Amino acid sequence: MAVDKLTIPIGHLGETGWWAEQVGANFQFQAATGRSLQLHIDYLLVPSPLDILDQVDIRCGRIEWTSSHFQCQEGVVSFVSEQFSARNSPFNLSYYWGTEALSFELKALRLAGGSAVISGRFKEGRWQLSLTGQSLNLAHVLEFMASLGLQPGAWPAAFSLRGTLGLEMKLAGQGKFPRRVNLGVQFDGFGFSDAKALQVGEAVAGGIQLRGKHAGRGWEITTEVVLNGGEAYFHPLYFAFSETPLHVDMALGQGEVDGHWDIPRFSLKQAGVMEAKGSLQFVQQRVTKARVQVEQAPMFALYQHWLEPFLVGTALGNLESDGSLAFALEYRLPDQWLLKVFFHGVDMADQQGRFSIEGLEGQFGWSTRTTPLMTELGWQKGHLYALKLGKAQLIAESKKNELGLKQPLRLPVLDGYLLMDDFVLKNPGTSLAHWELEGVLSPLSMRKLSQALDWPVLAGKLSGVIPRVRYRKGVIEVEGALLVRLFDGTVVAQNLRLEDPLGVVPQLEADIDINRLDLETMTQTFAFGKIEGRLSGQIRGLRLANWQPVQFDAKFATPENDPSRHRISQQAVDSLSRLGGGASGLVSRGFLKFFKDFSYDKIGLSCRLLRQICRMGGLGPANGGYYIVRGGGLPRIDVIGYTRQVDWPVLVKRLKRVTSASGSVTE
């Protein structure tokens, strides 16, 4: 009798790299179709990425069984595993008895919400696997990659992921462990976000190519990443990959002992923005050594894409820029930094008009090491608020996290200059950051200064000595007194304090003493009217907000025992009368036209500003008012003010009116 069916309980099979338990085989012999096989395996262990397969059913439509080998052709397979599943998936397999070599191919596998084809070969403990996947769910793929030990870091659990990808992977190894990997990934429409929306991506498109081998010290991997579609935000950086594609190429190395990853080489290219290269070393996920070099890059693009996001809310957070720059950065744990920045024709201008610099050339250096690093910078011109700055050169050196001048800095200001004898910048970017300077202001024209500051046009020269000035935590303070020579007299500022100087609302505080200013020099160049004599006074508790007065207590008067000539013109009499809201007395208005000027004993005026109200006063009480000018000699005249308080904006308008009017306004 012929046998057309044979059932064989095999038990278990395997060698290094794979193992099968509870194996049962059914053979069928049919004259028309030849031999076929049904194979059931309760438990099958194979290398990653398949790992453990349960309830494996294999049906071979046609088999070939010889003394040298076994082949399953036209087969289908079903199984379940943690990452894969198959249901009647096309399958081919061959096994050679003598060499124990096994090869197979499975199609239409279910993987990560998509489909996959996997093939493999096992021989003498060595194996090779190939995997091709389509329409794979990204989140599931990351889980799959992590199971292979190929994910460089844990993807944050709070992230939501969207999108599918295509995958091609080839693995080779020995025993349970992969030793080589080639991976190609293509994705389109990739999206992600974290719980706080600080890291977000939409419709990101691109690809990843990864090649790795496990050497004696651990894994060595080269990776190429191209992002050329969609957009992403990694706080505070924004990327529009369709406009400025990003290309990253890097080599990674893993230590076998501690398992930490190093990046001995990387390059980053962002089209139209910059090219960078360097290396990174890590210990316990901390950077211990770094080197980054950026090739010559357009300043505008580099600022827009990489610098501005970190500078928002600072004085440098809203710039227009041009030119190009390059830089090199070195870092070594715990706090050793070396920075070189190379400027080429750089222009920078604050869009709020607070400052600018043009034609910046040279090298800026910063070092926390003991070996000094030079800075040599030159620029053509610039401005600080309304003050025009001229061509200058900065020669300095940096070491131990500070920078100091190697030679005095001569900075042209209008038609004079500021000479900085000493300047030191320490610990930038930390809570201990501060700078100090000392210098001298050479004589500059008060006419040009007043025009630049939109003041009434003044005559004379301005000069002074700048004592030790310190900046720390957004505050500038002057140690001692700031002495300014002005109008043949002196102005001394003490307790000078400036908060947030380049911020939205700068705040200035000071106490000022004015000593023997020449009134003729002050008044001869504008329409207020001529006054001869000297003027002293004080301004206590001065406070400016955004450079506008909000509080002070000011008193000005002729100095005691002043020996100078005291004369006042008709026009000045009228101007003072209008400021004080009063009138001239002791001579008739009609009689004034016979005299060009008058003799006076003293001039005095005070204003206490608080809450936009100026409480005014003068030399003393006079007929229900107060003396602004007290006459003396012939022809004598008194000017009496009757306004006790006035809105500050109104008083400012009066001052502008009396200083800009042309000719005499007396009757």
Image (cartoon, helix red, strand yellow):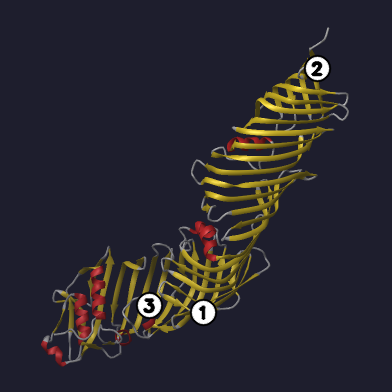
Residue furthest toward the top? 1
Looking at the rendering, in which quadrant would you find the N terminus?
top right
Count of residue discs = 3
Q: Amino acid at mark 3?
A: Ala
Res 342 quadrant in image: bottom right
Tell me the number on the disc at residue 10: 2
Residues at marks 2 and 1 touching, judged by CB atoms closer than 8 Å: no
Tell me which label, 2 or 1, sits earlier in the chain: 2
Q: Height in image: 140 above or below 385?
A: above
Residue where numbered disc 1 is placed: 391
Residue where numbered disc 3 is placed: 452
Q: Is residue 215 left or right of residue 151?
A: right
> Mark 2 or mark 1, which is nearer to you?
2
Q: How far from the left and from the top, in percent, is residue 649?
A: 25, 68
Q: Residues within 10 Å of mark 3 (few under 14, many from 20)?
A: some
Tell me which label, 3 or 1, sits earlier in the chain: 1
Q: Nearer the viewer, residue 608 or 248?
A: 248
Distance of label 3 from label 2 (alpha carbons)? 100 Å
Q: How far from the left and from the top, in percent, is residue 241?
A: 54, 52
Q: How far from the left and from the top, in percent, is residue 58?
A: 72, 22
Q: Secondary structure at mark 1?
A: loop
What residue sits 86% from the left and 23% below the top? 66
Residues at marks 3 and 1 touching, judged by CB atoms closer than 8 Å: no
Query: Does residue 197 appear in the picture of this structure?
Result: yes
What residue sits 51% from the left and 68% below the top? 322
Q: How far from the left and from the top, in percent, is residue 168?
A: 67, 40
Tell me which label, 3 or 2, sits earlier in the chain: 2
